[in-house]
Image (tube, grey):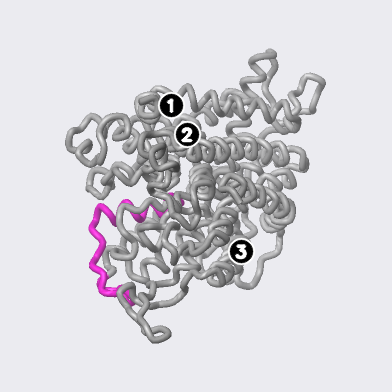
Amino acid sequence: MSPALAGILFIGSLIVALVVTHRPLGDYMYRVYTGTRHSAVERTIYRLIGVQPDAEQRWSIYARSVLAFSAISILVLYGLQRLQDKLFLSLGMAPVPGHIAWNTAVSFVTNTNWQAYSGESTMGHLVQMAGLAVQNFVSAAVGMAVAIALVRGFARRQADELGNFWVDLVRGSIRVLLPIAFVGALVLVAGGLVQNFAAPHEVATLTGGTQAITGGPVASQEIIKELGTNGGGFYNANSAHPFENATSWTNWVEIFAILLIPFALPRTFGRIVGDNRQGYAIVAIMGVLAVASVSILTALEMAHNGTVPQAVGAALEGKEMRFGVPNSATFGAATTLTSTGAVNSFHDSYTALGGMITMFNMMLGEVAPGGVGSGLYGMLVLAVITVFVAGLMVGRTPEYLGKKIGSREIKLASLYFLVTPVLVLTGTALAMGSAEQRASMLNTGPHGLSEVLYAFTSASNNNGSAFGGLTVNTPWYDTALGLCMALGRFLPIVFVLALAGSLARQAPVPASAGTLPTHRPQFVGMVVGVTIILVALTFLPALALGPLAEGIQ
């Protein structure tokens, strides 16, 4: 079987699996977030944290709850790292330096999981499990909660409340993420991933010889990092390491886990707003962008343009031979289209234009299908912008799902969109304007700029992947990228919740002959076009100086 045919079958099987699971998982999450009964475990948690689960919150209180929970999480995770040597299961690891601890705490709490360190030589088991792995769950659950709050804003009529953040957080963690992660971990263990408490340096005698034993609960951490579209990994080699990604079929499982929830949430959206066609339209937009990205990236890597790739006949540098070029490119597209950041190949070694596609995926706002929850609310914001543009074209007041898109709504949607470009371009400019920060680049010229641009694009969009040639383990980069991760996560969340509150307070607007149908292919095409045009207008100059210039050379 040729590599091209194998790649097509690999991608095709993923699409089939996602189509099969879209409806049942989406319907299940609809029941999770609309149900009124609380389990015994959930009631116990509510009593421990002092929450009245049946009391709903206005958007401002919902936002303060998100920010308070995240701030406390950052402090706890920072403290665990700084006190690591005094805690059990530390494996003798030293305390994590302050600037790395700050960067890591913000990274995992914001669902970015950017790692400026080698996991196996920096973190002990306790920090990995009680700190990082816990945030793999709850940071993803926060994104899902915010998405559901926005959906409720569209669905509710003349209401002040958007639900209860603490209930949404607990239900998302216990009823959605934990069960799927448990099953997924068993699948990965069966596929060869290791789940134990051995130290990284421990050696055991197996079948008359010696074999190094991995350290820590790799399988469970691996599945939740993919399922929660988190980056990071127990090992510095990430999902290219055989203990994190053993075979071609575990590679398929991990990509499927990355895409599973983000592609099912539009079904949940359609059920809550009472029109499944709206959910199908949103998932169609995501699907069009995702298929285009995977196809283009795979084609560029298979074409292997460049002096060295042409000489050896393939773009194999930085790619794991167990997976090959097509499957590595599919993983690269999936991880940058979502907020995952996990890698099974090194994006810095991609062809110039292939590396540009991974950046462009993140610049889209990671909406195809995006992170867990964040992809859905990002796509809905783009839908609001599209409806507004369409309304201007025909001279009508824009409406979406029976809600008017007035000045307040479009201002909030515009602010949401502008946050990440400001962070990305400002951060890149500051780094390139300093000789000390430019010294961290492995390469000069266009590729050096691409390394810096990729870093700030990844951090600001809460992705977590990187061009490995840039040395970011410095106080300046750790601080700057940490700020980008925090602002890139929480400012958009505040704008989304404010938008949800504004929509929920409105009375429904009856559909008329002039109302733009938002469930038809025409609208799907419009949103795809608006998304690409907005990103191109914003980032094309920077891309032209970096990967485009390198590709032309």
Task: Name the foreground residue: 7 vs 86.
Answer: 7
Secondary structure of residue under mark 2: helix
Three-letter residue code for mark 1: Phe
Query: Sequence order check: which comes first, mark 3 or mark 1?
Result: 3
Secondary structure of residue under mark 3: helix
- Front disc: 3 or 2: 2
Magenta segment boundaries in residue numbering: 85-112
Q: Residue 376, position in %: x, y? A: 60, 42
Q: Residue 395, position in %: x, y? A: 68, 13
For the C terminus, the image quarter is top left
**Looking at the image, is 158 positioned above or below residue 70?**
above
Question: Looking at the image, can residue 61 be seen?
Answer: no
Residue 180 disc label: 3
Q: Are marks 2 and 1 in contact (CB under 8 Å)?
A: yes
**Looking at the image, is 211 positioned above or below residue 299?**
below
Residue in view at x 40 percent, y 29 percent = 551
Report the residue that reaches farthest toward the left.
Answer: 436
**Looking at the image, is 534 positioned above or below residue 157?**
above
Residue 434 relative to residue 483: left or right: left
Q: Which residue is mark 2?
A: 360
Label 2 neighbour load within 10 Å: few <14, some 14-19, many 20+: many
Residue in view at x 38 percent, y 30 percent = 547
Secondary structure of residue under mark 1: helix
**Looking at the image, is 540 positioned above or below residue 172?**
above
Q: Residue 223, position in %: x, y? A: 52, 62
